[in-house]
């Protein structure tokens, strides 16, 4: 140990940061990547609440065991909302310098608030109002921000690039996000980001139900961040730099229900008095010495300005572009209006509206990943309990017969992972034909676009003997209209999407509250 | 090319500005340009073919081959009489045809191939007229028994009429026209005795050599070759596009006939002009091999290089064709094995990259259902011309994935959301408006299918 050095390297902290960056990048990519990749879907499946809802007990048990032994590592490595806060905390430190880095101080735990929120959350889940509970569920809150805010920005950048280098980038449609989902995401973003900038992990330690739950488990963990009182010089630095505000420096005590195992204190302690270890092992241990200066110790104004500007532009430009392109697309398709359904169509694998409402945490991963842009967050289609949960919208796309992406990625079991065969044998809705709207009724053109695009072969064009075609030579012919064989229709919406009738499709899908398999 | 157009100008004694000639040439190769350029000159008085030989054009006569069956010396380039230049009323431009035949004859072409069905029968009359001034034994005239003949009496009537139309006493080469099905041979030529009748005519000296022209399968060829008949020549469709084609199987046909030492006359060596207007990249590949030859010259040389070929017929429509083709065949230089392989590669690439041929005139627009027809076709043709069209049935290697991404990106970036091919309902309103006679709904359907297949890879 060298007295010259203020900061000593903690391999635990470095490792935590590396893992955190990895999972943050993977989760961000999972939501934002446009190419439909679901490579990182395992990161979504590793999330606690979705795993709990999905009955994925392996993940639940793993998280529980790790927390019971090592504390809330989950919150610092796996939870994307936690990492999101760490990002803003880090930015504040970088931009605000030493003063900002030392802005924290110990506070008493807000136990009553925490446990009440946890209780309400649990009740909401138990009574099948996952949609409301989802508002504070950390993974879903992150997912919504990514899908509703970041993905449109990414799409904007992509489309900008596509307009410049058309052969290398393909234009992508914007995900259809409604005002409610957008507002919720913006509010979440602002609240969580501001809280992180002001006071670190306050969200995690007052609101987050997962944080509260894991906090209880962490209390009994044998491995903990511990202060070696024999070494401690009571400088109080660890407390000032603890984003969880959980180090009571006066009493040399740590509130383990709030400690997220970030290990910052270990590195910040100039005398090496803090260790991550078991109680019995808090004996002298050799601190490793290293002469390298701490990374990024020096700051200067130009770098700060650069970061600020880059950050601002990277959000502003794509957002502006996105808005513009959305208008253009809207203009191009304005003649077509979404069909008005009596019963909403819920996605394949959701089994029933009720199952979806009970399990979905509205993380919008399915919305983000749907390659055909069919899914969008619901408004009132499922009632208030299902707000923001995914609903099928066939005005901008149809459900690909050969695709199971949404079910593959759903981490919460709200969309059960059906095989392709099972999906193709499932009925989520039934096509309904409205002859008055059909282009064949009005014009002399033959159509049949619904029948030719039906992947299930459920639509047949049959002559209407009351509608003869003018045909001077040869046999008398009649107009052909679609006839739907309900038993075969799966409700994929290919007919509705391809119908040329405007503004409303002459054929549309009516949903089934309970899917038929 | 310039040299040829100079030559043609001097031949026709018509002041065509070099620029307009060049411009016309540039428009899709010799085949197309020649037609429009020359038909406008059709009314001009002919002058004698001059001896002016612009630089670059070879002097002399075309290369000859000998029919091993009978020792006939036949020009390797033959004159096909199916595509004579026509006037605006659809009739043959006889004056221009005469000039073209004269030029051909003077440069040693001595094989002229007509048929009952060409130009509604008029081809026979015109070629007869054109050749009348030359000694009868100095050229070979080929004619054919049409597949439309009903019975023996009909065949006899037709044969007599053919002699009369051509104004000749005999045909040097006579073919059973367009054998495609075994029944044609079995029922018409054998059961009805038409073949025996033709043998009689041969004995009588009104037919010198008897053969057939063929558009059937190798199995049928096998059958015909095994008939107790001495075929003195056989005419098949052959060109580098059909050589390895699984349907046309030109290579197999060629090898079967060559194995029997029967001389072959080639038809459609340029595939009705299609091989004269290949994509830019493909032309570059060919030019690398033989810079002095045009794509049409390459196509003709491909056929003429094979030893069993007695004569390559070219249905020449314009003076340019005659001058250029004759130039290719004076001191004919066979293609190297490498050049031959290049052409087969060109064929493969051409087939993998077909073109719709949309010229973006937008006559089809506006589509009542909002399909962006011209741009959809433009993307397809552009990608195809660059040899970048992905083939979903081929290997899905990196090159394929690159092409796939390129094509899908272009498609997504150019075509608006509800203007893609999948929204075509096949109403057909566009089709009559298309000057290129593109079967628009069908092509849109093909593109939709391609896009769909690519999306699902």
Image: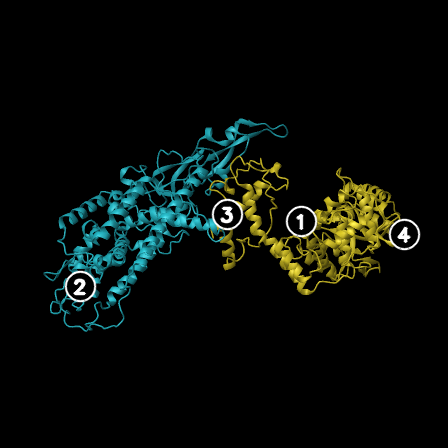
In space, the residues marked 2 and 1 are separated at their CA atoms by 80 Å
Q: Which chain, by letter, is cyan?
A: A
Q: Residue B28 — which label?
A: 1
> In the image, which is nearer the foreground, mark 4 or mark 2?
2
Q: Which mark is residue B411?
A: 3
Q: Which chain is yellow?
A: B
Give the image location of residue B335, x and y in percent. 71, 62
Numbered mark located on residue B135 in the image: 4
Query: What label does residue A484 carry, if any?
Result: none
Closer-to-camera residue (A64/A288): A288
Circle 1 SS class: loop
Asked whether B349 or B49 is in front, the reply is: B49
Evaluate whether label 2 is on the same chain as label 3. Answer: no
- Can residue B336 be seen here? The reply is yes
Q: Which residue is mark 2?
A: A225
Q: Residue B453: horizontal and vertical position, in percent? A: 50, 49
């Amino acid at each position: 140990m060298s007295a010259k050095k203020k900061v000593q390297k903690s391999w635990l902290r470095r490792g935590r940061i590396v893992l955190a960056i990895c999972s943050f990048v993977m989760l961000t990519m999972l939501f934002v990547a446009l190419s439909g990749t679901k490579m990182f879907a395992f990161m979504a499946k590793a999330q606690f609440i979705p795993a709990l809802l999905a009955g994925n007990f392996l993940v639940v048990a793993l998280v529980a065991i790790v927390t019971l032994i090592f504390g809330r590592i989950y919150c610092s490595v796996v939870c994307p909302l936690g990492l999101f806060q760490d990002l803003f905390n880090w930015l504040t430190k970088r931009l605000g310098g030493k003063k900002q880095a030392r802005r924290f101080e110990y506070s008493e735990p807000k136990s009553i608030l925490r446990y009440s929120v946890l209780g309400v959350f649990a009740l909401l889940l138990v009574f099948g109002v996952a949609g409301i509970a989802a508002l504070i569920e950390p993974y879903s809150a992150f997912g919504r921000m990514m899908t509703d805010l970041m993905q449109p920005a990414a799409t904007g950048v992509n489309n900008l690039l596509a307009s410049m280098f058309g052969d290398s980038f393909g234009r992508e449609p914007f995900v259809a996000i409604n005002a409610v989902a957008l507002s919720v995401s913006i509010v979440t973003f602002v609240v969580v980001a501001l809280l992180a900038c002001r006071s670190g992990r306050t969200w995690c330690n007052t609101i987050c139900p997962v944080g509260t739950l894991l906090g209880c488990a962490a209390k009994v963990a044998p491995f903990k961040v511990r202060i070696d009182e024999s070494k401690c010089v009571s400088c109080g630095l660890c407390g000032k730099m603890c984003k969880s505000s959980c180090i009571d420096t006066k009493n040399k005590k740590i509130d383990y229900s709030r400690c997220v195992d970030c290990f910052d204190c270990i590195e910040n302690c100039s005398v090496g008095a803090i260790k991550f270890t078991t109680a019995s092992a808090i004996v002298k241990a050799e601190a490793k010495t290293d002469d390298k200066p701490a990374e990024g110790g020096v700051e200067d104004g130009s770098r700060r300005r650069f970061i600020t500007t880059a950050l601002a532009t990277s959000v502003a430009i794509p957002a502006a572009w996105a808005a513009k392109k959305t208008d253009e697309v809207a203009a191009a398709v304005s003649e077509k209006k979404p069909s008005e359904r009596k019963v909403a169509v819920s996605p394949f694998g959701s089994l029933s509206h009720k199952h979806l409402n009970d399990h979905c945490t509205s993380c919008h991963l399915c919305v983000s990943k749907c390659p055909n842009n069919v899914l969008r967050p619901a408004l009132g289609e499922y009632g208030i309990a299902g707000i923001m949960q995914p609903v099928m919208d066939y005005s901008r796309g149809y459900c690909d017969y050969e695709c199971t992406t949404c079910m593959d990625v759903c981490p919460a079991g709200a969309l059960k992972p059906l095989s392709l065969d099972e999906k193709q044998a499932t009925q989520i809705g039934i096509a309904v034909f409205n002859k008055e709207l059909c282009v064949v009724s009005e014009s002399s053109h033959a159509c049949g676009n619904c029948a030719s695009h039906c992947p299930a072969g459920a639509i047949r064009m049959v002559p209407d003997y009351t509608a003869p075609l003018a045909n001077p030579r040869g046999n008398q012919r009649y107009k052909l209209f679609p006839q739907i064989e309900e038993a075969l229709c799966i409700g994929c919406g290919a007919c509705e999407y391809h119908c040329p009738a405007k503004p409303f499709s002459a054929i549309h899908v009516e949903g089934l509250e309970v899917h038929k398999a | 090319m310039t040299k040829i157009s100079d030559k043609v100008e001097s031949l026709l004694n018509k002041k065509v500005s070099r620029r307009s000639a060049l411009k016309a040439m540039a428009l899709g190769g010799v085949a197309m340009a020649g037609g429009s350029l020359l038909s406008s000159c059709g009314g001009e008085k002919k002058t004698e073919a001059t001896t002016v030989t612009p630089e670059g054009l070879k002097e002399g006569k075309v290369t000859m081959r000998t029919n091993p069956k009978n020792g006939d010396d036949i020009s390797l380039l033959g004159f096909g009489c199916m595509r004579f230049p026509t006037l605006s009323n659809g009739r043959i431009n006889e004056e221009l045809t005469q000039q073209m035949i004269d030029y051909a004859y003077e440069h040693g072409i001595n094989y002229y191939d007509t048929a009952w069905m060409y130009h509604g029968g008029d081809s026979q009359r015109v070629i007869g007229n054109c050749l009348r001034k030359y000694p009868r034994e100095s050229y070979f005239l080929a004619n054919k028994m049409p597949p439309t003949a009903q019975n023996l009496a009909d065949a006899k009537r037709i044969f007599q009429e053919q002699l009369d139309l051509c104004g000749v006493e005999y045909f040097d080469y006579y073919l059973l026209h367009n054998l495609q099905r075994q029944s044609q041979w079995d029922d018409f030529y054998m059961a009805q005795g038409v073949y025996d009748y033709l043998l009689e005519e041969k004995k009588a000296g009104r037919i010198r050599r008897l053969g057939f022209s063929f558009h059937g399968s190798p199995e049928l060829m096998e059958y015909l070759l095994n008939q107790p008949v001495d075929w003195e020549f056989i005419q098949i469709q052959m060109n580098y596009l059909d050589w390895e084609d699984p349907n046309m199987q030109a290579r197999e046909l060629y090898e079967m006939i060559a194995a029997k030492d029967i001389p072959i006359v080639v038809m459609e060596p340029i595939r009705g002009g299609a091989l004269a207007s290949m994509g830019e990249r493909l032309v570059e590949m060919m030019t690398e091999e033989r810079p002095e030859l045009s794509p049409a010259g390459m196509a003709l040389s491909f056929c003429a290089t094979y030893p069993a070929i007695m004569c390559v017929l070219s249905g020449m429509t314009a003076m340019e064709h005659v001058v250029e083709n004759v130039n290719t065949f004076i001191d004919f230089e066979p293609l190297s094995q490498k050049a031959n392989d290049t052409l087969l590669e060109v064929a493969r690439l051409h087939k993998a990259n077909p073109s719709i041929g949309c010229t973006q005139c937008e006559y089809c627009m506006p589509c009542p259902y909002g399909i962006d027809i011209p741009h959809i076709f433009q993307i397809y043709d552009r990608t195809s011309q660059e040899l970048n069209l992905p083939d979903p049935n081929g290997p899905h290697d990196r090159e394929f994935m690159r092409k796939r991404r390129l094509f899908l990106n272009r498609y997504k970036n150019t075509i608006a959301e509800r203007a893609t091919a999948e929204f075509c309902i096949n109403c057909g309103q566009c089709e009559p408006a298309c000057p290129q006679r593109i079967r628009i709904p069908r092509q849109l359907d093909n593109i939709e299918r391609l896009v769909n297949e690519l999306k699902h890879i």
